[in-house]
Every structure is written in structure tokens, then in C-alpha cells.
Amino acid sequence: MTQDEMKKAAGWAALEYVQPGSIVGVGTGSTVNHFIDALATKKDEIKGAVSSSEASTERLKELGIEIFDANEVSSLDVYVDGADEINATFDMIKGGGAALTREKIVAAISKSFICIVDNTKEVDVLGKFPLPVEVIPMARSYVARELVKLGGDPVYREGVVTDNGNIILDVHNMQITDAKALETQINAIVGVVTNGLFADRGADVLLIGAPDGVIKKSK
Ligand code: 5RP
């Protein structure tokens, strides 16, 4: 099985969490693209989706799924999204696709976070994947210096502007043993919009695409 086939298996498995008549929170990335394809098969049974990026919005619209603004809904039952890394307590690094801030907003208004990944994303310690941090452009150098003080090596993601008009610093060489504390610490740096640690609001259900099928884990 290829990595993409494992992503597809996880994406389609998430369909069982979608309730008829609901508005579904939809993440961003290649695994979520498979989920969106699956969701399109139920488009007449759901009200629509709250999307976490312009890219997902475009794909959802192309497939005939109505888009709702996050401000129009008080809460969502389910948010389905991928991850770049996930550990045993379902803390994640996200933001490889630069959509971390909107992903965090949609996750925050959702009762349940269904994380869909292929089996390369499970790790013992977070941090091998560089931690994305969304930063107001004016604060780029200041935030980078502060991240160095925290022990990381921030690298400016060249040529990337987020959907919110900001830049991304990818922080290399972090061994993240207390994800909640680091999430709070980085978010407190002036100029940081948010960082890609999803520990304060981690996943509730993990669907892992693996060669023998989809493995389901719950908190
Ligand atoms: C985008 C994300 C994605 O969920 C993460 O990068 C995983 O992507 P993929 O499913 O393509 O491996 O956080 O900002």
C-alpha cells in the first residue's frame, strides 16, 4: 500500500463520524482531500461545511458542498483534519500546509476532533517535523530571536503567505516533551498568531491508515 492509499483509507473511514443534517468541520491537506471526496458522496445528507482554508473551500465548493462561515455556527459536532505528527496522548504538530490558525479555530468550535493520518505520522516525541508558527510579517525577526531563546532553529518558509496574510517560521530541532506548555509559551510571544502545536485542544479520535486497514484509537 502506498502512503497515499493509506491516507485515502483514513480519509474515507472518517465518513462514519458524519451525522445526517450536520455542518462538518473540514481541515486541510492531502489526507483531508480524500475525506472531502468521501464527504461529497453524502452532500445531499449534510447541511454543509466550515472550512479551514481557501484550498479546502475551493475543493468543497467544486464538489457541491455548501460553505458556512465559522461565525455563523455556535458549535460543530465533528472536525476532521490531518496532522504532521501525533503522539500517544494525541497531541499534534500541524501546519505543514500553513493552515494552522484557521484549523485551530475550527477545532476550537468543534465537540470532537477526528484526526486522519497515514501510519508515518505516529511518533513517540513531537518535534522531528519542524514546528510551524504563523507570524505577523512585521514581527518576523523578533519572533525568530525569541524562538532561538526557546532552543529552536526557526527557518522562514520562503514564498508562503497564509490565508490570513501572514508568514510562517518553521522551528527545527525541538524535542517537545511538554507540548501544552510549549504551545502556551510560543503563543505568548508578541507577533505570533498561533503555533502548530495542537495540545491544548488535541484529537479525540485517531484513524490511522495502515497496510492492513484503518486502525482506530480513542482517548
Ligand atoms: C495543514 C495541516 C495538515 O493537516 C498536515 O500538514 C497534514 O497534511 P497531509 O494530510 O497532506 O499529510 O496541518 O496545515
Image: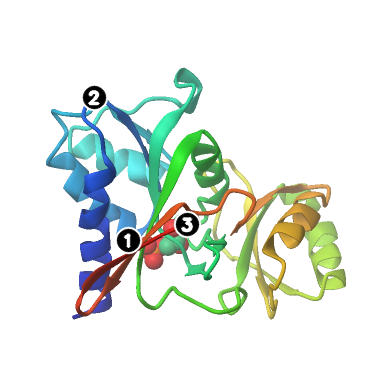
Q: Of callouts 1 and 3, which one flags the residue occurring earlier in the amino acid sequence?
A: 1
Nearest the eye: 115 or 160: 115
Residue topped by disc 3: 219
Tag 1 near tag 3, CB within 8 Å: no
Q: Amino acid at mark 1?
A: Ser
Query: Spatial distance from mark 1 to mark 3, Cα to Cα?
Result: 24 Å
**Relative height, residue 77 to residue 84 (above, below):** above
Residue 210 position, x and y percent, is: 27, 75
Query: Spatial distance from mark 2 to mark 1, Cα to Cα?
Result: 26 Å
Check disc 3 and report its element: helix, strand or loop.
loop
Q: Nearer the viewer, mark 2 or mark 1?
A: 2
Q: Residues within 10 Å of mark 1 (few under 14, many from 20)?
A: some
Residue topped by disc 2: 21
Does the beta carbon at disc 1 come under 8 Å from ligand 1?
yes
Q: Of callouts 2 and 3, which one flags the residue occurring earlier in the amino acid sequence?
A: 2
Ligand 1 quadrant in view: bottom left
Residue at horizontal 81 percent and vertical 49 percent from the top: 188
Q: Residues within 10 Å of mark 2 (few under 14, many from 20)?
A: few
Dividing the picture into quadrants, the one containing residue 82 is: bottom left
Residue 31 position, x and y percent, is: 31, 60
Q: Amino acid at mark 2?
A: Gly
**Relative height, residue 71 to residue 192 (above, below):** above
**How has the structure been colored for display?**
rainbow
Residue 127 position, x and y percent, is: 62, 75
Q: Residues within 10 Å of mark 3 (few under 14, many from 20)?
A: few
Check disc 1 and report its element: helix, strand or loop.
helix
Q: Nearer the viewer, mark 2 or mark 3?
A: 3
Tag 2 near tag 3, CB within 8 Å: no
Query: Spatial distance from mark 2 to mark 3, Cα to Cα?
Result: 26 Å
Residue at horizontal 43 percent and vertical 25 percent from the top: 69
Residue topped by disc 1: 30
